[in-house]
Amino acid sequence: EVRVVWAGGVTLENGDEPGDEERKLYKVTVQSDEGQRREVVPVALADLGDGDNNHVLCLDTLDKPVSVAFPAGILTDPNDDLNPETSAIVQD
């Protein structure tokens, strides 16, 4: 699993929590022990419904996650600003 921490609380524009459609938008780059990289989509999105700025991306691979990306314009912060295109390196 990978914990994603946004700069502010995140919801959809209508105030709902992200769900399965938003889960499919997360792209996680993973790396095998042999150094091969590939992109995967989380199998589940957890840590929802509590109004905080955390999402847990549940992965179905033993490969090491190295980065996460999410497209722009899907989630809003507490000021109703839409998120920019976002990517980050995964830290251990």
Image (cartoon, grey):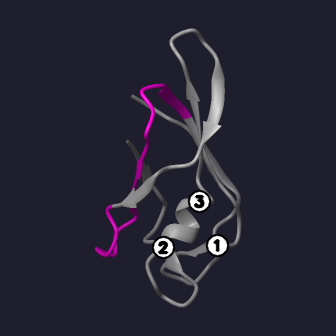
Residue at the farthest top position: 34
Determine which residue is flagged by label 1: 74
Residue depth check, mark 2 versus mark 3: number of the one nearer the observer: 3
Instruction: Give percent across and percent down for residue 58.
Output: 40, 48
The main secondary structure of the magenta stretch is: loop
Mark 1 burial class by Cα count in 10 Å: few <14, some 14-19, many 20+: some
Question: In which quadrant will I find the C terminus?
Answer: top left
Image point 64% across, 72% down: which residue? 74
Image point 47% across, 25% down: which residue? 64
Q: Is residue 53 above or below residue 34?
A: below
Query: Which residue type does callout 2 highlight?
Result: Pro
Marks 3 and 1, how far apart in space? 12 Å
Which quadrant would residue 1 be assigned to in this image?
A: top left
Query: Which residue type does callout 1 highlight?
Result: Ile
Marks 2 and 1, how far apart in space? 9 Å
Determine which residue is flagged by label 3: 24
- Residue range highlighted in magenta: 47-66
